[in-house]
Image (cartoon, rainbow, N blue to C red):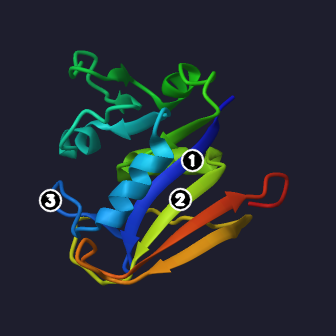
Amino acid sequence: MARVSIIVAASENNVIGNKGEIPWKLGTDLRRFCGLTMQCPVIMGRKTWESFDSTLPGRVPIVLSHDPFYFPYGVLTSRSLRSALAITEHYPEVFIAGGREVYDIALPIADTVYLTRVHATVKGDVVLPMLLCGSWHLASSAVHPASGVDQYPFTFETWIREWGTAI
């Protein structure tokens, strides 16, 4: 089975979205997303998929939707996370890219969380569910300042679940 990795950016107040959009501009984070997910399946909900500007070239996008007639061009669709994971089992890693409902159902089985902590408090209507409760350890952390391509300072964090310990 593929390693299940959550990839997410969240503000200091855990906002991940506002009115269908990401409430910041972080070019460095987008490059990290592209680099980490290249050649891998990327599972997301319908609203998240519809917020993307492109079809995610070089990846296998899988959109979760309750609508049995939802078949956007260039992606696989699935009615459940379980069935989406079943079609990705031959990959070494699969990424969960949101939104909130998909993070909620993926967190209990996730092995890794690639978190970009945006050092700002922003307004938003979508908040990240509680992450990293239980047996997780911080494997790496890198702080980045705001710059011409990055609206706010941020920290890349990689969290690894320690399976076999209490959650």
Real-space Cα distance between discs 1 and 3?
Answer: 25 Å
* Mark 1 neighbour density, 10 Å: few (under 14) some (14–19) many (20 or more): many
Q: Quadrant of the C terminus?
A: bottom right
- Mark 1 touching mark 2, by CB under 8 A? yes
Image location of residue 138, percent across then percent down: 67, 70
Name which of mark 1 and mark 2 comes first in the sequence: 1
Q: Classify the position of the N terminus by image quarter.
A: top right
Mark 1 or 3: in front is 1
- Secondary structure under the numbered disc 2 in the rendered image: strand
| C-alpha span from label 2 to label 3 | 23 Å
* Residue with the mark numbered 2: 114
**Residue 129, image x, y percentages:** 45, 62
Q: Which mark is residue 5?
A: 1
Q: Is residue 125 left or right of residue 57?
A: left
Dot 1 or dot 3: first in sequence order is 1
Instruction: Find residue 155 and report its horizontal and vertical position in percent.
Output: 47, 76
Which badge, 2 or 3, is on the more N-terminal residue?
A: 3
Mark 1 residue type: Ser
The dot on residue 19 is 3
Residue 39 in view in this figure: yes
Q: Quadrant of residue 158?
A: bottom right
Q: Amino acid at mark 3?
A: Lys
Q: Is residue 127 visible?
A: no
> Quick check: 53 left or right of 15?
left
Rendering coords of residue 115 (x, y %):
49, 64
